[in-house]
Amino acid sequence: MNDKLDKTDLSILAELQKNGRLTNKELASTIHLSPTPTFERVKRLEREGYIRKYVALLDADKLDCGFVAFCYLKMKQHTFENATQIMDAVKRIPEIVECYNISGDYDFLLKIYTRDMKSYQKFLLRILGEIDCIGSLNSSFVLGEIKNDNLLPF
């Protein structure tokens, strides 16, 4: 673990990871520290980049975009320009919520949310199909979510 973080810092991170809406007073009480030093520690953790941002996790099914696909992409040719074109395109496409440059048979792994299979098919043809440096792709579909808690193990 990083030498800059002590047990109290780690406790703050653990609690905020579980509930980012804790007030400073609630957080201070939970970690057994007074509010002022708790506030100062949180601000330092934010400033130093340990806390990147605060978000609300939404229910994809209730928002009618609960069809989840993992899509493996392979570039036509391994060039810096092709990789850059794919990475730039991915950043602009809202249905793609995660993208990883990976090793193995494929070059990128995408996590994609759409409404249903028909919407995913349209997405492949109209969005990904327009990126000319993609050589091939392979999709897998989520049948059921077993774990998705977004908590880092530290």
Image: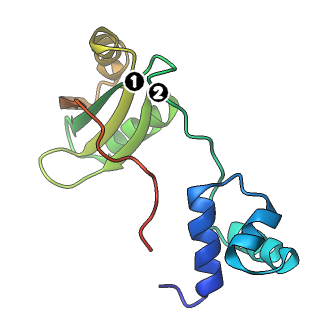
Quadrant where the image shows the C terminus:
bottom left
Mark 1 is surrounded, within 10 Å at the Cα level, by few (under 14), some (14 to 19) or many (20 or more) other residues, namely some
Q: Residue at x 32, y 10 (%)?
A: 122
Snapshot quadrant of residue 12: bottom right
10 Å neighbourhood of mark 2: few (<14), some, or many (≥20)?
some
Residue 18 against residue 108 in the figure, above or below = below
* Mark 1 secondary-structure assignment: loop
Q: Earlier in the sequence, mark 1 or mark 2?
A: 2
Q: Tell me the CA gap for discs 1 and 2.
A: 5 Å
Along the horizontal axis of the image, is 19 left or right of 144?
Answer: right
Q: Is residue 5 visible?
A: no
Rendering coords of residue 67 (x, y %): 34, 23
Q: Which mark is residue 86?
A: none
Say which amino acid is labelled 1: Gly
Residue highlighted by disc 2: 60
Residue 20 visible to the viewer: yes
Q: Is residue 50 above or below residue 64?
A: below
Secondary structure type for disc 2? loop
The residue at the point 29 percent across, 24 percent down is 132
